[in-house]
Amino acid sequence: MAEKRQLMVHHGHMSDMEASLRYSSAPHRREAILRRIELDGYVAAADLVTELGVSPNTVRRDLRRLAGDGLVRAVHGGAAAADMAATPFTDRSVQASAAKRAIAVAAVRHVEPGTAIALDSGTTTLEIAKLLPSRANLTVITHSLPAIAVLAPRPDITLIGVGGQYSRDTRSFGGPETLAGLEHMSVRTLFLAATSLDGTGVYGATPYEAETKRRLIALARRTIVVGDARKFALNAPIRVCGWDAAELLVTDGVPPGFKDVAVELASPTPA
């Protein structure tokens, strides 16, 4: 993330003992956590342990309480703002399903036979996995468990699954092991998903997710962003990249005046 903000509020010259007493109060700790998330959109549990001077168990209890009260959203390794895309993968997969399939149909037209492609994790990229053409001699690299499950039975595809620490929220692998697994790979085309989109670029939900997306962008010769129009109305805390990193956005709609990257509009087929 950008610069780490210090939670401590100094009143004159506060001693270490005074600071410790300040955050030994659960209400004060939770207020401090909420201020940090309000500023940054996300906070790592490990950072809270250091900054608040409390144990990991105390931080976990505070985050569970805040999440239970609906004030934050629990994510891998910490907590995020409650108003961002908090819907579980299984629920997201049925939202705007017609639009996602139409986007996938348009996106697979950009798959070049005989090349390697990378699929980011997400419900729209899962639709792309389902529609990849047969007998195209493709190599597919992905850290998405649902995409791996879809592609594993296909003998016509060389599948490279990248492991790491599994996130149930995204049904994908992430963390240092995933980044290391991607380090020496190269692909022709990356299909990049997003938690949210705006005029400045692509956003993700957590630092792990954002770092994985950036590594995928670095290994691809071209990046195609895929996401339905609802993504422009959602908020996410971590900026993954600007539009200069993408060649194309495939979507079913953009806000008025959006001219930040080439756009291909996909129209859902009426049922």
Image (tube, rainbow, N blue to C red):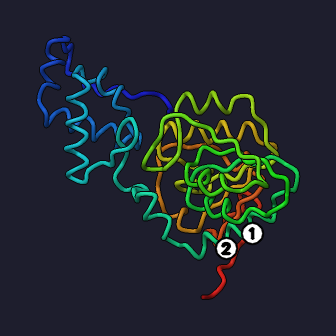
Measured as percent of width and height from the top left, residue 170 is found at 48, 50
Is disc 1 placed on a helix, strand or loop? Answer: helix
Measured as percent of width and height from the top left, residue 114 is found at 88, 51
Q: CA distance from mark 1 to mark 2?
A: 6 Å
Measured as percent of width and height from the top left, residue 40 is found at 41, 39
Residue neighbourhood size for the residue with mark 2, other residues' Cα within 10 Å, grouped as few (<14), some (14–19), many (≥20): many
Question: Which amino acid is tagged 2?
Answer: Ala
Q: Nearer the viewer, residue 85 or 32?
A: 85
221, above or below 112, in the image:
above
State the image quarter where residue 56 is shown: top left
Query: Taking 72 as reference, is 238 left or right?
Result: right
At x 55%, y 28%, the residue is 176
Residue assigned mark 2: 102
CB contact under 8 Å: marks 1 and 2: yes
At x 64%, y 42%, the residue is 161
Is disc 2 placed on a helix, strand or loop? Answer: helix
Image quarter in which the C terminus is found: bottom right
Residue neighbourhood size for the residue with mark 1, other residues' Cα within 10 Å, grouped as few (<14), some (14–19), many (≥20): some
Residue assigned mark 1: 106
State the image quarter where residue 20 is shown: top left
State the image quarter where residue 103 is shown: bottom right
Measured as percent of width and height from the top left, residue 38 is found at 34, 44
259, above or below 75, in the image:
below
